[in-house]
Image (cartoon, helix red, strand yellow):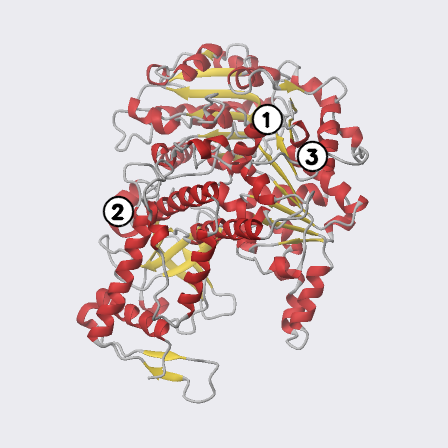
Amino acid sequence: HGLSRSHYIQTLLYDLLIKSVYKDNTNSTNFILYSKLDVNPLRFAPAYPAPQFEALQLRNEMVALERQIANLTAKDFSNTNVLDSIRPNPNSKTFNKRDLNIFKEVYMGLSALEKKYFIAFCGFIGREQQLAKTGMHGVDRMNGMASLWLTHFEDKYDNFEILNHLTIAVNEAAEVEPRILFDRTERTNPLANFRQGDIAILYPFDNEQTTVLDNQIFKCSITKIDVETVEVRLRSRQHNDAVFKTFTHWNLEHDFMDKSYTDMFKGLFAFADYAVQMNNYPLQPGTPDKRQLLLGLEPPGQAEGDLPIPADKGNMTNEQIRIFQKAILAKDYFLMWGPPGTGKTSVMLKNMVEHLFYSTNQNILLLAYTNRAVDEICHAIESISEEVKNNYLRIGSRNSIQPGFHHALFDVKTWDYIQDKQRKRAALLEVIKNHRIFVSTVASIAGRQDLFKFHSFDVVIIDEASQILEPMLIGILIKFKKFILIGDHKQLPAVVMQKTELSKVEDADLNKINLYNLRNSLFERLFLLAEKNQWHQAYDQLSHQGRMHKDIMQFPKEYFYNNSLNVLPDSIPAHLEQLEPIPYHPETEENNLESILCEERLIFIPTPADGESKTNKTNRYEAEVAAQLTRLYYNIFKNNNKKIIPGKTLGIITPYRAQIAQIKETLIEENISTDGLTIDTVERYQGSAREIIIISFCVNASTQLEQLISVSEAADAKTVDRKLNVALTRARRHLVLLGNIDLLSQNPIYGQLIKSCFKLEYKPYL
């Protein structure tokens, strides 16, 4: 039939999917459209049983290979593994043969250590990819893509994981910007935990037994969401939008992205390819070998040149100036450890960008893990000058970033050129070459690898580096002359679904390069290695924080930062705010609770376990106390003529989305305003702060302690509860903790924390 074999096989599998969903209700006829052909572009692709079985067999072999890769561990490399057996078919004439030959040449060209490194991370990525699909049942929100059809509607509703019974108000699915505006109905769960920017699955809703397997689905992003409406942007324009006129009600569920795992595999292979090139074509003496540097086999080069003075010296501590100078002068890489509130982005990154932009001709790439952190980077560099504000490009989607930074988006700056097809390519290249600063998430830049073909970068600065898995960075860093990683390995690490035992490294060769657990970041591995080998030129720690009052800081300082965290020095005016007494007073002295809130910085209120909670992920007692504390703090601020500033003043942290919904529901029942109030998980709070933080630990059973605690397993053997560290260090002026004292005290760190707090007796009338 003149069909490409790979296209034909793909069509046969699609045919099987259609028959699986629609059973005997449809009779499909299959064609492949080759749109570039002038003659006979539409080719018939008959679904014969024999080739269909062959295609299914090929698919099964691929699934089996994925499972074998996921079984690779970093424990025993003596036996032949599945990667050794990957060979091209001698009879194959397709591009697959070429690709398999390339893989074989690269894999076989690795040194013994490099091969162990490659195998270990292949298995790690494979397990993560598998769990993203199949899930880990019993662990909150880690149920994988399969939960879309395995989890019952009632469970999704109870766990606030579904926006149900939506009705279409505006249908623009067929427009260039395919958007649909939905109205919530009385049956829509008002507390369903979705946010602007979330990616989602949209599908018609027939009844409570409906799943994504029963109807056509649409991938989309939530662009706007409020108490009455939800707007989504479809991933693809729908020229035939009849389905949206057929069904009355629609559901939205969280989507799962598989691309990040593919990007990690690609990054790992890019590093392996580079390593083989270095093995075959050694560099000239004195030229740094990025492979050896990244593995930690060679020390980074010594600093050269004079010490630059930052332009914003007046707002920097002497320590910040010293570390700034080290980072700028570092030859190959620099690792900056910045605990909470130490000015990693607002001071250090900003001054480094200013220096590189005005004092050098270097091209700069700025990366972070989350869009929220990239927004912070944009805010910092735009404050440098109007010139810098107009001369950086932001890579990403407008749906995921703050509107104030849309002007810098690559798509916005190139829109006029895209319309002019005659000049499109040349004009786009011109825009790229005329910008020296590019800003992006790691995921977005991984999807824009072509950028490196058209634009060379001298230095990359990566914020939140301790939250990024090693395979996500290793293939990017080989492209730069120098990299600066900024992070804090005592705060939250990257999210990893597999059990810690599976990611442990039990191999002496890999342990020598400080690789003890594959879930730890490259930042952590290199920082501890540099510290161990005393490569002082390549690392340093910021120790002065300008966020927390000294009383809030004391516990993290002692238990998480080995007493290396301090308030600002006397030379910085904000130093006084970290020492001053509480500047407001209760309305009346008779209100004992209000008086305590005005007198104490760190308070613990013991609460009962909620025996009526279906999943143990809600606690109505803590929700009630959180609501009443909110009312009291609002009252205190009002009586002391202090403004409640949204996103700045008050925040509530809790580990479960269900408890977030429980607190919101209680606030509504008590008619307490949520203006300026942020209620979210600790993961969503990393990188931000509030004047007052209330933490609802929501522990109703001892089995929940394991999930509540995120213990660092660093090679230096210094255990740190990262989740607790982040939660406590979000507060600037006041911190109130709610939890069951008997259950929490089973953990030594929590026991010490409770002892350090002022304890307030729980009373139902709170």
The residue at which mark 1 appears reads as 533
Q: Quadrant of the N terminus?
A: bottom left
Q: Quadrant of residue 123?
A: top left
Q: Is residue 541 above or below residue 49?
A: above
Cα–Cα gap, marks 2 and 1:
50 Å
Q: Nearer the viewer, mark 3 or mark 1?
A: 1
Q: Residues within 10 Å of mark 2 (few under 14, many from 20)?
A: few
Image quadrant where one finds the C terminus = top left
Q: Which residue is mark 2?
A: 151
Q: Measure how far apart labels 3 and 2 are at the Cα level.
A: 46 Å
Q: Name the residue that disc number 3 marks.
A: 348
Tell me where residue 522 appears, x and y as whole percent: 53, 37
Q: Earlier along the polypeptide chain: callout 2 or callout 1? A: 2
Query: What amino acid type should be assigned to the residue bearing mark 2?
Result: Thr
- Residue 667 in picture, x, y percent from top left: 42, 32
Which element carries disc 2, helix, strand or loop?
Answer: loop
Secondary structure at numbered mark 3: helix
Q: Nearer the viewer, residue 4 or 110?
A: 110
Q: Residue at 62% across / 28% down in the picture?
A: 341
Query: Above or below — where is 236 with respect to 346?
Result: below
Nearer the observer, 217 or 168: 217
Query: How would you rate the neighbour count of disc 3 (Cα within 10 Å): few for under 14, some for 14-19, many for 20 or more?
Result: many
Q: Which residue is depicted at the point 62% across and 61% down?
A: 453
Q: Nearer the viewer, residue 214 or 119?
A: 119
Q: Amino acid at mark 1?
A: Asn
Q: CA distance from mark 3 to mark 1?
A: 25 Å
Q: Answer left or right for 519 relative to 287.
A: left
